[in-house]
Image (cartoon, rainbow, N blue to C red):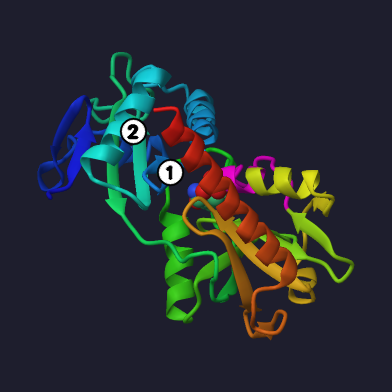
Amino acid sequence: MSRIAYVNGRYIPHADASVHVEDRGFQFADGVYEVFAVYKGVLIDEAGHLDRLERSLGELRIEMPVARAALVQILRRMVRRNLVTEGLVYLQVTRGVAPRDFPFPHAAMPTLVITARNKTFPGREVKTVRVIITPDQRWARRDIKTVALLPAALAKQKAREAGAYEAWQVDDDGYVTEGSSSNAWIVTRDNVIVTRQSDHNILRGVTRMALLDFADKNGFRLEERAFSVTEAKQAKEAFLSSASTFVMPISQIDDVAIGNGEIGPVSKTLRLAYFDAMDQIAATTRAGR
Ligand code: PMP
């Protein structure tokens, strides 16, 4: 089976898919993206990702390239045509193609690119990972999911070179913002779940929202506030969240051990709850088809 990509209304072989050299995504990183997990053949948290896409586009005054209902159909078709049962769907929208100039072009049509691939996720049982601390070198609107991912790529590369899985980025005051592609969480010695409040400093993770909702409804103590590197290194548990990792437990921050090297009880409960929620979404979506 050959992979199919979607580019501006056309389903084409992945190997032949391309955008124009003067696409503003390429020339200015003038665009946004989304990543959806596919689990049991179904897009997870579809509405949450589409809501955030609309918000990101609105903040940059880029039009939705197609109506939301049509986009849903295209995304689902991409899952089917690429035979994705478990994996990821990536979607990029840029301001489009225009002669190179900084101000917004008058007549550009947004570019829409969607790709999909199978990927086996680690299951309910998961090993812990290590994170490193690095300065946050991104711009001041991290709530917009832009394709300007160079600082994230640099941070992730630094993590890889240190033998770690993720880099937790830190603001000028010593507080953790988030990972290069995930939100950051700790559980304090008093069993309070802490994750940074969603303002312009972090991306509003769709997974983060689902976890906050679950924790709130299930009586966990929660605080949405900034936490320092020092507090993180003294935490009982630490974990990260994203659409592709769900809840990933952390056993080490820089050279400081967190917990006993195994997934902690709160992280475990949240990870299992997220899998239960995905099973539920998959079952109800398939029943509704
Ligand atoms: N923060 C950043 C910087 C990210 O790139 C991601 C991954 N998209 C997240 C947080 C997690 O967001 P989500 O749960 O929606 O994948």
Residue type (three-letter) at the residue carrying disc 2: Leu
- Indicate the position of residue 135 as horizontal and vertical percent values: 60, 65
Residue appearing at x 50%, y 50% in the figure? 243
As drawn, the label of residue 36 is 1
**Left or right side of 35 for 256:** right
Asked whether residue 63 is in view, the answer is no
For marks 2 and 1 on the same chain, the one whose residue lies earlier in the sequence: 1
As drawn, the label of residue 156 is none
- Indicate the position of residue 70 as horizontal and vertical percent values: 34, 20
Residue position for label 2: 75
Residue type (three-letter) at the residue carrying disc 1: Phe
Q: How many marks?
A: 2
- Indicate the position of residue 159 as horizontal and vertical percent values: 49, 73
**Left or right side of 231 for 70:** left
Q: Dot 1 surroundings within 10 Å: few (below 14), some, or many (20 or more)? A: many
The prevailing secondary structure element of the residues shown in magenta is loop
Gap in angstroms between the C-alphas marked 2 and 1:
9 Å
Mark 2 C-beta to ligand 1 under 8 Å: no
Residue appearing at x 47%, y 27% in the figure? 57
**Residues marked 2 and 1 touching at CB (< 8 Å):** yes
SS for callout 1: strand
User: Would you place residue 242 above or below residue 6 in this image?
Assistant: below
* Quarter of the figure with the C terminus: top left
**Left or right side of 193 for 273:** left
- Indicate the position of residue 234 as horizontal and vertical percent values: 79, 76
User: Would you place residue 200 above or below residue 251 in this image?
Assistant: above
Asked whether residue 216 is in view, the answer is yes
SS for callout 2: helix
Residue in front for this viewpoint, 33 or 190:
190
What stretch of residues is rendered in magenta?
196-209
